[in-house]
Every structure is written in structure tokens, then in C-alpha cells.
Amino acid sequence: MGKLEDLSGQKFGQWTVIRHSPEFGNRSTKWLCRCSCGKMVSVRACHLLRGATVSCGCAKPQLISAAKTGSKRPDIKRNKECWETRECKQCGKKIEIAKKEIRHGWGNFCSRRCAWDFRKHKEIKCEICGSVVRANKRVRFCSLRCMGEWKRTDPSRHVTISCKCCGKTFVIVKKEIKRRNPAFCSGECWYAWARKNQKRGKDHPCWRGGDVYRGDGWNYTAELIRMRDARSCLVCRAYQGKKRFPVDHIVPYRIAKENEPINLMTLCTNHHGYKTGIEYRLVRGDVMGFCRLLREAGWPMDIVSEALLKYGFNPS
């Protein structure tokens, strides 16, 4: 244990240390002190040294009145060895910080507002209008209007395309190319091109539903398959609710050209979409890749193999 520092006779604020007190609190030595008002109190040595206490409470009304009127704070002396004068990192205001707080990494700002502005905000110059605003460090524009203007005028975000009908060039956002295939500058051009080039009647690719057409009596056949499969998905065993589950052709209808029960199975919406997304492998002849993806997704391979063998595909 270190040597006890004698504080007898010293003054801390309005406290005058009289003698050592036999009381202890939280491993801290206490000293019997007399306030300027005459009150005797046992005070911890650490509170005296770092200026945490300056009076018994009689100086509190003076501090409150000074804060309300905006006048200078009353001169209450503290132990200068425990305090340090620093500048706020944000506004440059001089503040007095206890050295203990500095050791803990505190005391860099005069207020929470300055700390927030320093860490989260800074002055930025808008790239469109040039106005200076305080905002998050990642912000590049002063408003949504300026950001929209940047999106419309930034050349790196756009691409130039020629119209398939009139040959006129137009500008479109790159993201729109991934979402749709923009080949025409307007609806009028698309209609004019379609009247000249698209087939009509029986020659049209969507005649009688196109790829959606599954032959006569398909709805009745699909309902029989749902009843056979107990209205449940054969992969995840989920039961259909108010919305009926789709019935899927293991070998696509454009290849099989018939609705044989051995080639049909009930699937939930998620697994039906997954199966439709990988059918191109079977159309291209990649039977092994098609079966591998179904096996990894949990498909009943005995049913799949039987349907593939019927239509001339070797699953092994």
C-alpha cells in the first residue's frame, strides 16, 4: 500500500481539510473537512484531489443563478494539478477537463453536439449546385433534386441505343437494359415494327397460348394429378392452401407433346419456378446436369428417371 498523502490544512474549493477521518469508503481514504459555511463533512480524498466536490452544497445556488443569468461562474478554486485546459476538436472552444477523463479517452469536445458533428457530419459541397451544407460524410448532394439531376445527366450511368424501327438514337439507363430489352424509342415505333414483322394467326408464336398451351382437357388432367399427389408438393411435402399448386411436366410439354400421368407431378410455387429455370439444360441435351441439379434440390429421382426413360433420355 502506498504512503498516505497528508492533506491537512489544504483548501479545495470551499473545503478546508482538518484532519484524517477513520472512515473508509470503497478503498478510498476520507478526510474531515470544514465548509466555508461551517459544516463538517467526511470527504473522500479522490474527490478532493480531482475537484469532484467543492462545497457541501451551499455553493449550488450560486452556480444555478450564474447559469440562468449567463454571468461568469463564481470563482471556486480547484486542485489545478488534477485538471487540464484543452480545445474542443470541433469548435475550438477552451474547456477544462479532469486528467482522469483524459486517460479514459474523454474530454475532446465541449458538448455532445460538437462530438456528433465531428464524428458523423462535415461540410460538403454539392456536386451539382455547389452549395455547402452540413451532412453525413458519405453524402454527395444537398438534396434529392440534385441527386436526381445527377442521375439524369451522368454519362457513366447511361448508354445510347438505336431504335429498331426508325433508327433514331436515344439514351437509357444501364439498369433498364438488364430489366427489359429496349429496342424501340417509343410505343408507336414498336407498333409499326410489329405490324410489319410479327406473324399473326396460327403462325404467331403465342397461338392458343403458345408455350402455355398444354392440350385439350389440361385443367381436368391437372386436377386429377393434384388429387393423386394428395394436393402436396412431392419435393417439400407442403400442402396447398387456397391457391392451387401448379402441375409440372418433368419432360417439358414442347418435347413430350402429351400429358401422360407418369410425366406429371405436383410442385409448390417455389420448386416449380426452380424446375422451370433449369429446363433449358434438358432442351440442350445436358441430361446429367439437369438430373444433378434436381438431385441436389431434393427431387424424387425415381419418378424423374422413369419419366426421362419414357421419352428417350438416359439419366445415368
Image (cartoon, rainbow, N blue to C red):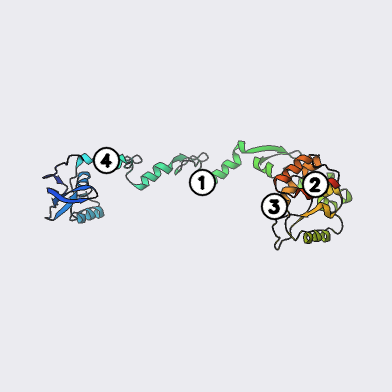
Residue highlighted by disc 4: 99
**Disc nearest the viewer among 4 and 3:** 3
Q: Nearer the viewer, residue 155 or 238?
A: 238
Viewer-closest of 188 and 9: 9
Question: Is 305 rendered above or below residue 233?
Answer: above
Find out whether the residues at labels 2 and 1 contact each other: C-beta distance under 8 Å: no
The residue carrying mark 2 is 305
Q: Quadrant of the C terminus?
A: top right
Q: CA distance from mark 4 to mark 3?
A: 64 Å
* Chain-order first, disc 3 or disc 2: 3
Q: Are marks 3 and 2 in contact (CB under 8 Å)?
A: no
Residue labelled with disc 3: 270
Say which element carries label 2.
helix
Image point (86%, 55%), residue name: 215
Tell me which numbered mark, 3 or 1, is placed earlier along the sequence: 1
Looking at marks 2 and 4 on the same chain, the residue that comes earlier in the sequence is marked by: 4
Looking at the rendered image, the disc whose residue lies closer to the viewer, 1 or 4, is 4
Alpha carbon separation for disc pair 1 and 4: 43 Å
> Which amino acid, mark 3?
Asn
Q: Which residue is mark 1?
A: 143
For the view shown, which residue lies furthest in the bottom direction? 242
Mark linked to residue 168: none
Residue, far right: 202
Is residue 287 visible in the rendered structure shown here? yes
Dot 1 alpha-carbon crowd within 10 angstroms: few under 14, some 14 to 19, many 20 or more: few
Left of 265 or right of it: where is 35? left
Name the residue: 77% across, 60% down.
226
The image shows residue 123 at horizontal and vertical percentages of 43, 40
